[in-house]
Image: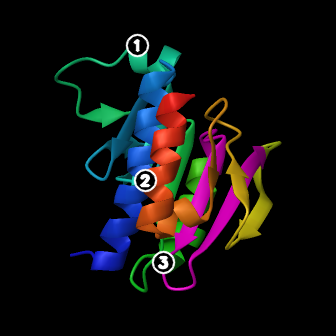
Amino acid sequence: PAKFKHIAVVGNLYDLVKAFVLAHDLGWVGSEKVMISLTRNDYEPDICYFNAVKAAAFQPDQMRFPAPDFIVEVLSASTEANDRGVKFDDYAAHGVAEYWLIDPDTQTVEQYRLHADVYELAIKAQTGELHSFAVPGFTIPVRAIFDDATNQATLRHLLAA
């Protein structure tokens, strides 16, 4: 089972990404029970985003999904090695354009961008803004992931835009 801090971070970011994607008709956002089937492993990322073209092909009874455009994993002691290791490599090998690793203990976000089939660190931050490469126009303050008041203000801003 996940710790409260893990669940809170996933919930905060999921709410923001989903609201923005729906408001702008950009595709579909899934969370922990979405089975991503890749060549050597299947994964259930904390958050994943599929662009509108990929999402349009989904069927109501579909249970396995292709590589998304954007994945978020929230780190924990039991998952960090995989999130930074085999998942990191598999997501890059399957063309996941953007990968965020979030540490709820240090309240830090690492944003990776796929470049020539390899992830490059775009930003590692506890403050400032995150500008998504894979979700067009999605920009949020880092604090919105960790702070409920900032999250709610950001959600209102995203829905008003």
Residue shown at 56% from the left, 42% from the top = 70
Image: magenta residue range: 92-114
Front residue of 132 and 35 = 132
SS at circle 3: loop
Q: Is residue 116 above or below residue 73?
A: above
The amino acid sitting under disc 1 is: Ala
Q: Is residue 9 above or below residue 119?
A: below
Left or right: residue 50 versus residue 96 is left
Q: Residues within 10 Å of mark 3 (few under 14, many from 20)?
A: some
Left or right: residue 42 versus residue 110 is left
Residue shown at 59% from the left, 41% from the top = 94
Where does the C terminus fall, quadrant-wise?
top right
The amino acid sitting under disc 3 is: Pro
Distance from disc 2 to disc 3, alpha carbons, whole Å, reads: 18 Å
Q: Is residue 108 above or below residue 139?
A: below
Where does the N terminus fall, quadrant-wise?
bottom left
SS at circle 1: helix
In the rendered image, residue 107 lying in the magenta stretch gets the answer yes
Question: Which mark's residue is nearer the viewer, 3 or 1?
Answer: 3
Residue located beneath label 1 in the image = 56
Front residue of 133 and 119 = 133
Residue located beneath label 2 in the image = 152
SS at circle 2: helix
Q: Are the residues flagged by discs 2 and 3 in contact, CB closer than 8 Å?
A: no
Q: Which mark is residue 2?
A: none
Q: Residues within 10 Å of mark 1 (few under 14, many from 20)?
A: few
In the rendered image, residue 102 lying in the magenta stretch gets the answer yes
Question: Which mark's residue is nearer the viewer, 2 or 3?
Answer: 2
Distance from disc 3 to disc 1, alpha carbons, whole Å, reads: 33 Å
Can residue 118 be seen here? The reply is yes
- On the image, the x and y values in percent for residue 113 come to 74, 49
